Amino acid sequence: MKKYLSIIISLVAAVMLTFGAAEAKPKRYKARKPAAVQVHIDIGSQTMSVRVNGFPYAHWRVSTARSGYYTPRGTFGVTRTAKVYYSRKYDNSPMPNSVFFHGGYAIHGTGYIKNLGRPASHGCVRLHPTNAAKLYALVKKHGPGRTRITLSN
């Protein structure tokens, strides 16, 4: 009887391990949705192009870091947004319609529109206030998680 009992216990254990292993398959993670809003900033030409759902939306002049400052390169997601923001680092300078992408770096509106198209900032990406409002609205509409910002030379 003991012999049969040990065989039954072994069979039950084998069945449990087999079905337990089937249930222990790793969970599949959903692929991240593709970026609905794609922003590309070309630092060399001081321009920004925006695509929405793969279609061209806008092409604007910008200002990035002037000599002695730095604008980061790479591809970033949106870390936060602020309709109204004032720089704590640079004399409470207004940064309307800010879309932050890397630490304190942001794309935002500027009052210095005469400098658009050439390096002039402390590192942020400056836009005409009307265009900054349009970009801010796109990010809000489609979501920060579905916005990608790429900066290259």
Image (cartoon, rainbow, N blue to C red):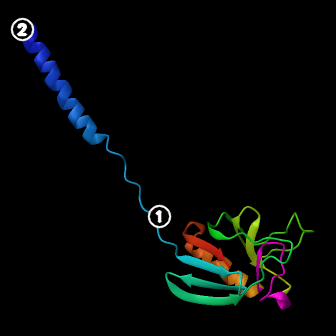
Q: Amino acid at mark 2?
A: Met
Q: Which residue is mark 2?
A: 1
N-term-proximal mark, 2 vs 1: 2
- What numbered label is drawn on residue 32? 1
Res. 101 visible in picture: yes
Dominant secondary-structure state across the stretch colored magenta: loop
Res. 140 visible in picture: no
Asked where in the image residue 16 lies, by quadrant, the reply is top left
Q: Which residues are magenta?
A: 113-128
Mark pair 2, 1: CA separation: 57 Å
Report the side of 142 relative to 31 (left or right): right
Query: The N terminus lies in which quarter of the figure?
Result: top left
| Magenta region includes residue 121 | yes
Q: Amino acid at mark 1?
A: Arg
Query: The C terminus lies in which quarter of the figure?
Result: bottom right
Q: Position of residue 10 (x, y in %)?
A: 16, 21
